[in-house]
Amino acid sequence: MKTVQMKSIFQIGRHVLQVFGNQGRWVVAVDGVLLRGWHSTSADAWSAGVAEVDRLGLASQVAEPALALAATRS
């Protein structure tokens, strides 16, 4: 018997979140990068992916003003 792997894709802002799973093990990728670990439900995997997207969004909000400030000092 072949195991079918489920895959869901979500667009969150400018990021792509992918949730993969079968047999009670779910993993998540953000922008094509697989996050570490696995989750017992698709909802837990999705939640971990959303948290990573939030982290990436916050990091870019911090980096963009810093880059703008550096450009004005040149």
Image: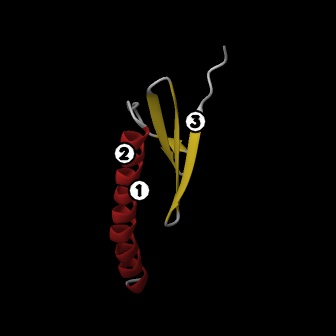
Instruction: From the image, tell me which residue sits under label 3.
Output: 6
Image position of 41 with respect to 62: above or below? above
Residue that protrudes farthest toward the top in the picture: 1
Please state which of residues 63 and 25 is positioned toward the viewer in this rendering. 25
Q: Residues within 10 Å of mark 3 (few under 14, many from 20)?
A: few
Q: Nearer the viewer, mark 3 or mark 2?
A: 3
Residue found 52% across the figure and 65% down from its top: 14
Dot 2: element: helix
Please state which of residues 8 and 28 is positioned toward the viewer in this rendering. 8
Residue 32, x across and y down, in percent: 57, 46
Residue found 42% across the figure and 46% down from its top: 46
Comes first in the chain, label 2 or label 1? 2
Instruction: Name the amino acid, label 1.
Output: Val
Q: Nearer the viewer, mark 1 or mark 3?
A: 3
> Distance between the Cα atoms at labels 2 and 1?
9 Å
Image position of 37 with respect to 73: above or below? above
Question: Which color mode does the image show?
Answer: secondary structure
Q: Which mark is residue 4?
A: none
Placement of the N terminus among the 4 image quadrants: top right
Image position of 6 with respect to 2: above or below? below
Residue found 45% across the figure and 27% down from its top: 25
Instruction: From the image, tell me which residue sits under label 2.
Output: 48
Instruction: From the image, tell me which residue sits under label 1.
Output: 53
